[in-house]
Image (cartoon, rainbow, N blue to C red):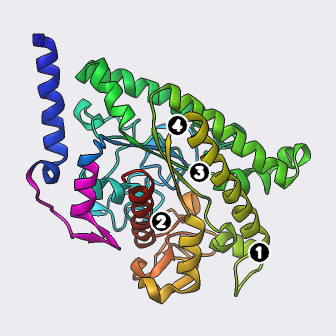
Amino acid sequence: MAMREKVLFVIFIMGLISFCPSLMEGKMENDDFIGEVNVKQLRKMAWKYNVTSLLVFGDSSVDPGNNNLLSTTMKSNFPPYGKDFFNALPTGRFCDGRLATDFIAEALGFGETVPAFLDRTLKPIDLLHGVSFASASSGYDDLTANFSNVLSLPKQLEYLMHYKLHLSRQVGHEKAEKIIRNAIVVISMGTNDFLENYFLEPLRPKQFSLDQYQNFLVTSMYHNVQVMHRLGVRRLVVVGVPPLGCMPVVRTITNQNTTCSKPFNQAAYAFNAKMKLNLAAIKANLGMLTSFVDAYAILQAAVQNPTAYGLKETAKGCCGTGLVEYGETCKGSTTCNDPETYVFWDAVHPSQKMYKILAAQAILSVQQDILS
């Protein structure tokens, strides 16, 4: 082994040790379980299957702060966002605390959070075990991202190419390829394609029926995954669209005071069914390991039976009135006393408690479909 390769290998191993003490030493800093997930067993499985990192693409459900660096109004780097984050810091996460991907990263032993790729304080070693390229208000339809001047999915994939270059400089080309190949890649988006595009703006409804638009989104997703595959991605987790009609803001605008809006939920449910078929095609045609996280079923179960999850409030968010506020309209608002009992943090986004529930279910799906 040449001297340069030896140095790069040492840097790579030191990165593993610094980020994954639990994997190297068999110790855990946190609870043994996240929901039904045995964290110690998960980390053994991740080690067995050489899981190297967590790479994230999507919208506000998984954006840890990339939009902070963009010229867009779709931001949340101000109070009361971050109320329950470390040091009550508003990071740009549309939540009172951490996101599902943060909990997944922690469960895998990759640190307590997934950093934003555009974060200017990011150090080279921070790249070793993953980043998020996600951008709030983005979607499978590039037009959705254009409306808010945020990162489209193709742009997020362009940043994945930059990420690979950074990795190659740090650990060498061969190990950079291995990190990508053995990474778990998460895509979580689609909500904005409906709420901020098809059901709000006039262009797409003139071009497509709802069924046709869903097919358009699925095709767009497939083409972007083909790009991921060419870049070396082999393990793909797709998070389905949640029950849109149960979001407080949707219930407010549709005057559904006592129940979720059926038309919005039906649109989400039908889209998820198409996405599942799309994932099966991806697995068959590209040979990728795939997993579908049914966010619709998970959130709907919490809304219908909150006490089973230690929750109480399902119809409104914790921020402001909880009926319409999110992003800028949540800024500086008063909040509920106990977000831990709320399904939603604001009128659109789940609370940290709900994200932890989603994370546990996502991990179970990954264990079954990818780490087995």
- Marks 2 & 4, CB-CB < 8 Å contact: no
Query: Looking at the image, which is closer to me, 54 or 177?
Result: 177
Disc with the residue nearer the chain's start (3 vs 1) = 3
Question: Looking at the picture, how far across and down is residue 122, in whole percent?
Answer: 29, 36
Amino acid on which disc 1 is placed: Lys
Q: Nearer the viewer, mark 2 or mark 4?
A: 4
User: In this rendering, does residue 110 appear at all?
Assistant: no
- Of discs 4 and 3, which sits in the foreground? 4
Q: Which mark's residue is nearer the viewer, 2 or 1?
A: 1
At 28% from the left and 50% from the top, the residue drawn is: 46
Q: Quadrant of residue 171?
A: top left
Which secondary structure, mark 2? loop
Q: Position of residue 60 (x, y in %)?
A: 53, 53
The disc, 2 or 1, on the residue closer to the chain's N-terminal end is 1
Which residues fall within the magenta stretch?
25-46
- Which numbered mark, 2 or 3, is in the foreground of this view? 3
At horizontal 52% and vertical 25% (from top left) the residue drawn is 230
Residue 28 is left or right of residue 333, and the answer is left
Quadrant location of the C terminus? bottom left
Residue 168 in the figure: left or right of residue 276: left
Q: Mark 1 points at which residue?
A: 262
Q: Residues within 10 Å of mark 4 (few under 14, many from 20)?
A: few
User: Which of the 4 image quadrants contains residue 365?
Assistant: bottom left
Q: Distance between the residues labelled 2 and 4?
A: 48 Å
